Amino acid sequence: MSKALVMDSYLLADTKTVVAQAKAGDPAGFEALYRAFEIPVYNLCRRICRTAEDAEDVLQETFLEICRSIGQFREDGSLWGWIRTIAASKALMRLRRNKYRDTDELHDEVVGQRREDTHLRMDLEAALERLSETSRAVVWLHDVEGYTHEEIAAMMGKTPSFSKSQLARAHARLRRWLGEEVAA
Amino acid sequence: MTHLSMEQLVSLREPGAEPGAQAARAHLDTCEICRAEFDRLHQRIARLKALPALRPTRDRWPGVRARFEAERRARRLRQAGLVGLAAAASIALLLSLRGTYHAPTPAAVPAELAEAKATSQALEAAIDQYHPESRVLDGRTARIAQELEDRIAAVDSELQMTDLADPGRRETKELNLWRERVGLLDALVDVHLTRASHAGL
């Protein structure tokens, strides 16, 4: 059984019944889907979007899309896998729309100086937050959600090489910001 | 000695052999520094997976439900050929008022009041999504929207006066006004949504 299918039964005990209810247009079915997947969807959106407000908007857009498109969900697949792809696409769309300035290099310098001055190390949460939206999205989708570089590239409208290089650069930065460098 | 780059270390975690993977793996077997770096990479990813789940600060379901239901109503109206905005607005208004007007039990009033306020807020958010103030409306749509907005304003004035009502009847009066407000907002959503769908927005 795939990890996403395991997640289905973990998040929603009676997936088949709820999906059938939602496909029949029953509001109770839609609400049950929302209650079951609200937190994992929000968590994914929040890890990709810059602000909590953006993430909440994407959460709402994701579930609106789920309500509209539940008829297209094929029940031989994973419900969480289907919902997650909608959420990831919406979150990446939000990133493109907002066109935030990529401040990786600036962050690099600022954090580097601060570390030298104070010998403080960032925790993982803060370091992740410091990555650019694109790098953070690639790290999260690849390392945590388990998407391949090909899948990430398709969602972002980029090449797999772009996804690979973003991931490597992000890890180099995280390593430095977390103070994990190994003396050669 | 040249150590493995982060790009090489990251690609060693991928399933399948990338070009140069064999040489990189051979190096990893003999180089303690690169092995330590590779272990740290694994540990970092494990820590990323273990980060606590973040939660939204508020319940977004009422907003999703309000928008989806408004879309469904507009779709049904389009399919039934009821393209007249006036008809859409008045039917929606009648349905929403008939559906919500029932006498509440005294114990249920606070909960129903809270629900009516939340629904009202969700419908206002749904209207905002269509940016009505920045859109050009045809004369008939503008008249219907204006009429509904005037009635909402009248309900709001009455709501401000409920503090003066008899304390025993205040909550019930307030609930009825909030329900009326929800019905009017619901109709206003339909007006904007039907217009937007006809304009292909």
Image (tube, coloured by chain):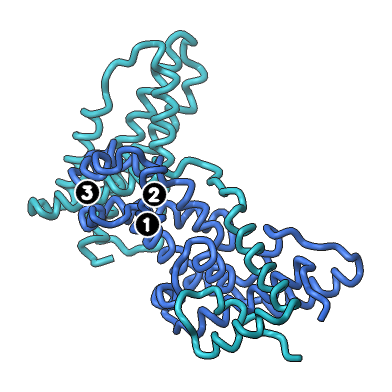
Chain colours: A blue, B cyan
Protein chain holding label 1: A
Q: In this view, does B22 lie above or below B195?
A: below
Residue identified by numbered label 3? B72
Look at the numbered disc 2 and give the secondary structure of its residue. Answer: helix
Q: Which amino acid does label 3 sit on?
A: Arg
Measuring 85% from the left and 74% from the top, which residue is drawn there? A113
Q: Name the disc covering residue A6, or none.
A: 2
Residue B132 seen in the current view: no
Protein chain holding label 2: A
Name the side, left or right, on which A105 lies relative to A157.
right
- Of badges 3 and 1, the one in the foreground is 1
Rendered-image quadrant of the N terminus of chain A: bottom left
Let me know if marks 3 and 1 both belong to one chain: no
Protein chain holding label 3: B
Residue A18 seen in the current view: yes
Rendered-image quadrant of the C terminus of chain A: bottom right
Measuring 81% from the left and 63% from the top, which residue is drawn there? A121
Outermost residue to the left: B81
How many numbered discs sit on the rendered protein? 3
Q: Where is residue A37 in the image (x, y as percent from the top left)?
A: 41, 46
